[in-house]
Amino acid sequence: MKRTVNSELPKEQAIGRRDFIQQVVGMLAAAEVSLGRMEPANANQAANAAGQSGNHPNTPFVGIQMSPHTMLDEGIEPCLDLIKETAAVNAVFVYSHAFHTSTLGKPLRDLATDHGKPPRDFRNRVPSIWVRHHDEYFRNTRLRVRSTDSELEFADRDLFTEIVEPCRARKMKVYARILEAAGRHIENFDEVRTIDVYGNRGRYACWSHPDYRNFWSAVASDMFGHYDLDGFQWGAERMGPLMNVILPWNDDPPTCFCEHCIARGQAANIDAGRAKEGYTKLFEYVRRLADEREVPAEGVFTIFLRHLIRYPEILSWEYQYRLSREAVHKAMYDAIKAVKPAADVGWHVDHQPSSWDIVYRAEMSYEEMAPYSDFIKLILYHAVLGGRIYSWYLRRFQNTILRELSLRQSLEIYYDLMGYDKNVEPSVEDLRREGFSPDYVYRETKRSVASANGKTKIYAGIGIDVPGSPPEDPEKVYQATLNAFRAGVTGIVVSREYEEMKVPNLCAIGRGVREAAKTSE
């Protein structure tokens, strides 16, 4: 039997929820005064923001990333009121396709408990697809989005139809959001999987495969043809073959060497055979490093460079991988603009390329992405970055090409290469305990704005309450928000997910936004 849950609150309960928001904002404002962070007059303004517009007249673009099931469970209107009146949000970025497994629901320990309604554990209980698809859009691809299990909670709800009127009433824009992953929710996905250097199928799809590219164009066209959307954000958290060898997330061999990638390489005058041979030798060299603790007599990094010199096709193939992904971006951009030219279409850039993947940075500037990017949203999560740099960067590189360096030496080089202030950011001993500072947000934002060179908008993804972070400091959240605007962004997107975000930190975002709005007068 289908489980039908109407999560909209009755009118009297919704009013109570608004009273709750007013009380919370008022108490937080009073707390700011007691700590000496806010003048009494400003505290009164913050308290009065609840129940009013919540925004300064010059409030810049402020988006927030949200999961559909959370919005439906809390109630659409109470949820919108909370984010507007605390964080000055004027655009919601809601998953249309929750392909990435971490978006399907989270353990209770990762969920905020101060939204006015107790959170629930939705893991494996809610849909992954939140829009209705139409087969006529998919004529040019064998791929299809799998049907939603009608027994799942909220499976009968059409969120992107339901939220339009409440958002318009609050002067909020509606963005669909997708984070690409493996093919669990895509029919015939095996036919478009990558091919590795040994001829085996990989776990992800090939960017160069026409069926995969046409699939995403069809998804985009279908959504904008049937829903009243203001914008779209798409992301894929994958490294290129070179970084996946030297900074491995798993032991997967390099990809892709399918017929479509080989044809692409040949069109660019790249010898596919030598590229495959070079990647195979580099991959096997790095695997031996992980198995053998002894450093080669000639030096680990020296032999790594020797592979690149002997096989320049390694770098050429890596660049083609990047270009093939950009072609997927451009195809979606063109498909959406053909339906709705005014749509705001952009891309999610995850934490690796925004904050430590130097190869990605070298491959393409944001200015070069601008012709098919109305905006680029960067992950700039300051608090969780410390632990990520320690575990995802320093430790992994120490097992491969930087094993001749200590973690401290590697961190020093990282700070110098990335342009972060080593006198402000944590030492190697403090990385996991302290996280990065708001200064990191300023510096990385400024670099990104310079990379765009005025040709596309930069939205800073300000992370709050991301699982794995040290305890969040609202004052640092406020400073990080203000620093993003000081560095020249067009707007921010509050991240990672709304259901994780505690109200004091949402209020800190709002304080920074309103301060930035006043400064811009």
Image: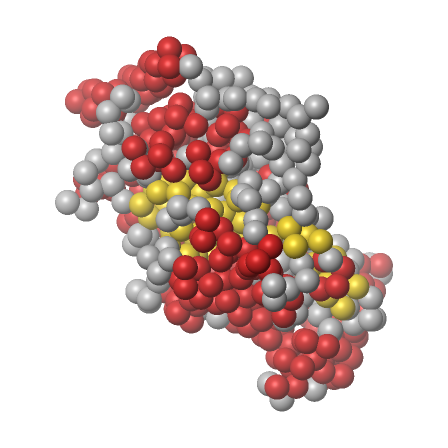
The foreground one among 68 and 138 is 138
User: For this view, does 32 lie left or right of residue 227?
Assistant: left
Q: Quadrant of the C terminus?
A: top left
Percent position of residue 21, x then y: 35, 19
Q: Residue at x 60, y 33 (%)?
A: 155
Q: Residue furthest front?
A: 136
User: For this view, does 512 lie left or right of residue 152?
Assistant: left
Does the rendering let one see residue 40?
Answer: yes
Q: Residue at x 55, y 59 (%)?
A: 137
Q: Is residue 231 above or below residue 163?
A: below
Percent position of residue 317, x then y: 64, 77
Residue 303 sits in quarter = bottom right
User: For this view, does 476 lie left or right of residue 247?
Assistant: left
Q: Quadrant of the N terminus?
A: top right
Q: Residue at x 30, y 33 (%)?
A: 170
Percent position of residue 298, x then y: 76, 75
Percent position of residue 480, x then y: 38, 41
The foreground one among 154 and 418 is 154
Q: Residue at x 53, y 61 (%)?
A: 217
Does the rendering let one see residue 457?
Answer: no
